[in-house]
Amino acid sequence: MSRNRRRYLVLDVFTDRPYGGNPLALLPEAEGLSATQMQQIAREFNLSETAFIRPPRHRGETHRLRIFTPTQELPFAGHPTIGAALALADEGWDQAELVFGQAIGPVRVSLRQQKQHRSAWLWAAMLPEVGPPAPPSAALAALLGLRPTDILAGQWGPAAVSAGIPYLVVPVRDTEALARAELDLQRWKEILKNWWANQVYLVAPLDGPGGTRYRARMFGPAIGIPEDPATGSAATAFPGWLAPRLGTTDGILTITIEQGAGLGRPSTLMIEAELAGGALTAVRVGGTAVAIAEGTLRIPDSNSETSG
């Protein structure tokens, strides 16, 4: 294929049904594209993320993966990583693992065959860390159009966590409060725009506090995503909030997150968090994907130097 045209794929990630999950545009042969060109292409697709597979740059990598929202490049994101791994597997990658070089570092992905579906599981390149104390719940309630009593408090209250991208986890009492939430952009600019974690990850327990099944919503205006149907990087960070509250000290904690139903794109994210002596030692986020479209994309002109 000529350098001014490249093949693209569209996949729905974190679902096994077409037109669910989180859509991803993927260029599987993106060598030679500049950062400017990749950003223009991501803006053209206008999905939450567009991913570009390139040859590896460092020993131990099988591929390099660059990920762009419509407005900026990300150091790491979950659904592009899962989608890229499954697309490569569909196109003949016959090894059990891949390693994507990303800005955050090497991201390992394991492939599993589960009945009729193949799943991919990314290993967190950075274990979750806890950020500064969250803003007051009353301010967060106003930010989200909720009552202060809708937001859980005390041990189960809000906290900031990151596994490469920081999120403010805001737990609410039930799925009714979760569905009612609406982000006030002006209040977000005043409270969170310049804060450590300026993306809001709203979660509701499906089995009450103490359970491991949650429904989530993610508001990311800082990266040009009003609301995301499925957020793998937030799911990667989430055990940093949940595991200490459950008091789990050893073994594997299995967590399920539902997301995107209110957007008409139901998604399921699976999490395995390994603990030893009360500390997280590994986090894996898994999911499936469905191929939706493929075609040829005209590459925009660029005077920028090609970047790695």
Image (cartoon, rainbow, N blue to C red):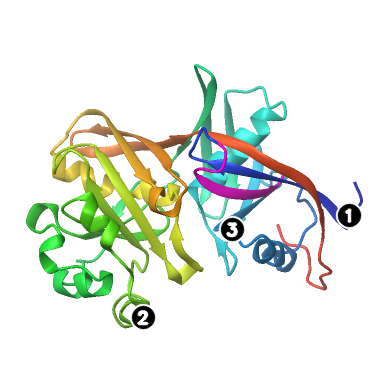
| Residue at 60% across, 46% down | 101
Residue 98 vs residue 139, the one in the foreground = 139
| Residue at 57% across, 67% down | 72
| Residue at 22% across, 59% down | 159
**Label 2 or label 3, whichever comes before in sequence order:** 3
Q: Position of residue 307 (x, y in %)?
A: 72, 62
Q: Position of residue 7 (x, y in %)?
A: 79, 47
Residue 230 vs residue 93, the one in the foreground = 230
Disc 1 residue crowd, few under 14, some 14–19, many 20+, Cα 10 Å: few
Q: Amino acid at mark 3?
A: Leu
Q: Nearer the viewer, mark 1 or mark 3?
A: 3
Q: Which residues are magenta?
A: 18-28
Q: Which residue is mark 1?
A: 3
Q: Amino acid at mark 2?
A: Lys
Disc 3 residue crowd, few under 14, some 14–19, many 20+, Cα 10 Å: some
Q: Which residue is mark 3?
A: 47
Distance Cα–Cα, label 2 vs label 1: 41 Å
Outermost residue on the left side: it is: 154
Q: Secondary structure at mark 2?
A: helix
Q: Which residue is mark 2?
A: 189
